Amino acid sequence: MTEQNLALIRECIARARIHEETTHHLKNYLTLLVPRLHRSIRLPQGDPVAALLQFVIRYIEYAPDFLQALHESMQRSGIEPYGGVFIRIATDFFLQPPEEIEQKGGLKELIDEAYLTHRLMEEINDRLLMLCGTPLAPMDNSLANILVYELLGEEFASKLDMAVFYAVETLFQPNNLDEQLKEFVKRHPQASQLQSLQDWPCLLSEDSDIQLSFNSLTSTKVTEH
């Protein structure tokens, strides 16, 4: 990942925020969506739209932060030659998104690109956990992805998931990247541990008023910074 590409992603997000300030396109979309959200998603009573809007903005803005943190961690640990391809794919999701994604320059459209990035990270972490016994990045964004999946709608989010699955399956072909990573982790086990959680940007935090309730028995906070 080049600094130029990272700057392009952040410029794209900055332009989208300006677009939102003048059009309120995302806020209006969320206003219509809130009454139809699944009952497992619990928003604060006071201003649910504002809470959801803040969450979505953080979700989008942290995508390039995670990419940068992951890139720097891989460089320090020496795993970048083996894992850098993941970052390149995630970068392309932003700069050259799939045809299914609308390109209108607003925050609402960038939810799609951010979801692709975060889902790619989640899938790669899961795959490497099974493959090498350790994730590539010390974070878990699965709950945030569940919430964004609901915001995107099952039909469209499933299409984006398929794009992620295709990318991951292509990377982890037999005798390809998986064997390289297993051999590297075997020879350099400390490198796979990258950095601690406190070295990573916080995607979500414990002070969020947004909660996910599963089977009406347990309630897990979707964290927001």
Image (cartoon, grey):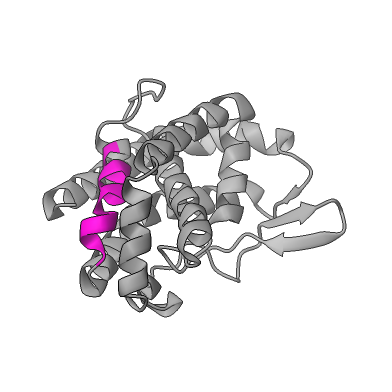
| Segment colored magenta | 79-92
Horizontal side of residue 128 vs 35, given as left or right? left
Of residue 78 and residue 51, the one placed in the foreground of this image is 78
Question: Measured from the top left, where is residue 207 in percent x and y?
Answer: 60, 70
As drawn, 211 above or below 109: below
Of residue 141 and residue 34, the one placed in the foreground of this image is 141
Q: Which residue is drawn at 63% across and 31% down?
A: 32
Q: Which residue is drawn at 43% across and 31% down?
A: 163
- Magenta segment's dominant SS is helix
Of residue 168 and residue 132, the one placed in the foreground of this image is 132
Marker count (numbered): 0
Q: Which residue is drawn at 34% across and 44% down?
A: 17
As drawn, 22 above or below 79: above
Q: Which residue is drawn at 25% across and 45% down?
A: 88
Of residue 91 and residue 14, the one placed in the foreground of this image is 91
As drawn, 49 above or below 152: below
Question: Measured from the top left, where is residue 153 in percent x and y?
Answer: 61, 30
